[in-house]
Amino acid sequence: MLLVVAVPLAACSPSLNGCSWQGNCTEPRDTTIFAAASLFPAFTNIGSQFQANEVKARGRVVTRLRFIGAGTQMLTAQIQQGAHADVFASADTAHMATLEDAGMLSGPARTFAHNKLEIAVAKGNPKHVQTLADLSRAGLVVVLADPSVPAGKYAQQALSKARVTVRPASLELQVTSVLSKIALGEADAGIVYVSDVTSNAKVSGVTIPDEQNVIADYPIAILKSATNTTAAQAFVDLVLSPDGQAILKAAGFQGA
Amino acid sequence: MSQVRIPAALIALAGLGLLFFLLPLAGLIVRAPWDQAVAGITAPETVTALGLSLFCSVAATGIALVLGIPLAVVLSRNTGNLRGVMRALTTLPMVLPPVVGGVALLLAFGRRGLVGSLLDQAFGIQIPFTTAAAVMAETFVAMPFLVIAVEGGLRSLDPRYEEAARALGAKGWMVFARVTLPLLRPAIFSGAVLCWARALGEFGATITFAGNFPGRTQTVPIAVYVALETRPDSAIVLSLILLAVSVAILVGMRDRWLGAL
């Protein structure tokens, strides 16, 4: 399942923006950003900032950012199969390394954020979940991400650190599905990222102590197949800039 | 009778269309790890997914037969606006994106759903994330195929057989069981096979309503999706199995409806 959002454009009317057949085209150019599902809320905001910066500097929208959000494993597979993307932001270093080993990155990946795990529960924590050990409680419907998804892999690591065995009701294919099952009330608890809880008003978070927690590293890179490298570089720079880092922190991430 | 000549442009486009169907299949067959195919089919996770898929799709077809044939009878005997509305409702799952179907099922039969919340409170029954949920998702998506096929059969039925039975003193249920049903056998059979094939391939509604857990709700299509990333070879082997089943259905039914289609 993919989430696609094109950042809304200010004052862009095809008939008025002077896009002629001779090629002096001022139609905004697409830049495609593949981002881990957990990054979606933060990147949407960074995208708005990007657009605002562009309008300030150039007087108009030059780049149309297209965000494709899905599980990191799915995005990696799609890029390997030839899907076009300019920028890839992964929820773990392993999948980025896969693309690097395949020679698909135009330069080294840079870590731009960290994320920790948190137990997500229904708003107000009606089932009184306090620790990871509580997740093994009988009658509690627990949903995790599949181990092929970074969030699922991290959750397994955290559970084994805490020496807890959980019998999950489902292994979802992206971390946002874990969140939505809890937000819908179909599951009582799940393990997601701190940023997921921050961005969702319908769930509460239960902190996992550092000694049991896992730090997820988020690397970002420009792909060799990028067609709009200038804009791709500008986006990566913005993500790493104080402005971008502030947006990420507001969304629950830890800075680079 | 003289053969009507088909314009060359049409033939070229038809060839393209055929190629479009053929190439993905060729891709599957060419890229399949044939040397590992046997190991792939007998791998425990494959066997588990296959067994579950078989169970769920057969159960869904069973439910579709029990509920779908009466529904087809009612649809075929009704006229006017009510029939139009009922028919639209019945065929809706055929055109509805399966994921939307899954969300709708959650909102109806989930713990907080219209019916699900009552079930939970009264009996402590929770449907999502269970094999029952996978069966329900498949039934929701696949039953229309059976209803449509049976309704078509009913409408092409010669009413004189039923009239004759009634004239000889048979009552409503007797006429249905001894005259209508046997006459409908071909339509029921082809409808059931179509329904089963659709249930076997169901992905979107299942993943949304039933989730993904090996042995409980991870049917073959979901296993293919999960394996594509971590074990691409088993994803291809599982896909081949589904392809083989589909081909078997087409070959097996060629006399019944392939020719007439």
Image (spheres, coloured by chain):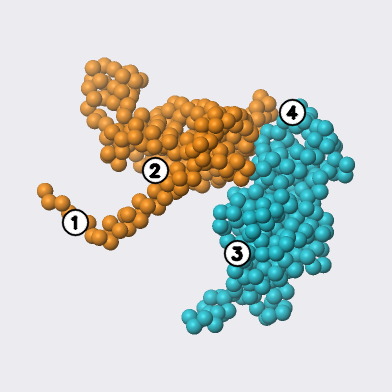
Chain colours: A cyan, B orange
- In the rendered image, the residue lying farthest to the front is B35
Three-letter amino acid code at the position of disc 4: Gly
Three-letter amino acid code at the position of disc 2: Gly
Marks 3 & 2, CB-CB < 8 Å contact: no
> Distance between the Cα atoms at labels 3 and 2?
52 Å
Chain of residue at mark 4:
A
Mark 2 vs mark 1: in front = 1
Mark 4 vs mark 1: in front = 1
Quadrant in the rendering for residue B12: bottom left
Q: Establish whether labels 2 and 4 are both on one chain.
A: no
Q: What residue is at 28 percent from the left and 33 percent from the top? A: B255
**Residue B173: x, y in percent?**
35, 20
Task: Give the SS element for disc 3.
Answer: loop
Decide which of tag 2 and tag 1 comes sooner along the chain: 1
Three-letter amino acid code at the position of disc 3: Ser
Residue beneath disc 2: B84
- A123 left or right of A36? right
Q: What residue is at 81 percent from the left and 45 percent from the top? A: A214
Quadrant in the rendering for residue B42: top right
Q: Establish whether labels 3 and 2 are both on one chain.
A: no
Chain of residue at mark 2:
B
- B195 left or right of A236? left
Mark 2 vs mark 4: in front = 4
> Distance between the Cα atoms at labels 2 and 1?
40 Å
Which image quarter is the C terminus of chain A in?
Answer: bottom right
Residue beneath disc 4: A139
Q: Establish whether labels 2 and 1 are both on one chain.
A: yes
Q: What residue is at 34 percent from the left and 39 percent from the top? A: B79
Q: Establish whether labels 4 and 3 are both on one chain.
A: yes
Three-letter amino acid code at the position of disc 1: Arg
**Tag shown at residue A225:** 3
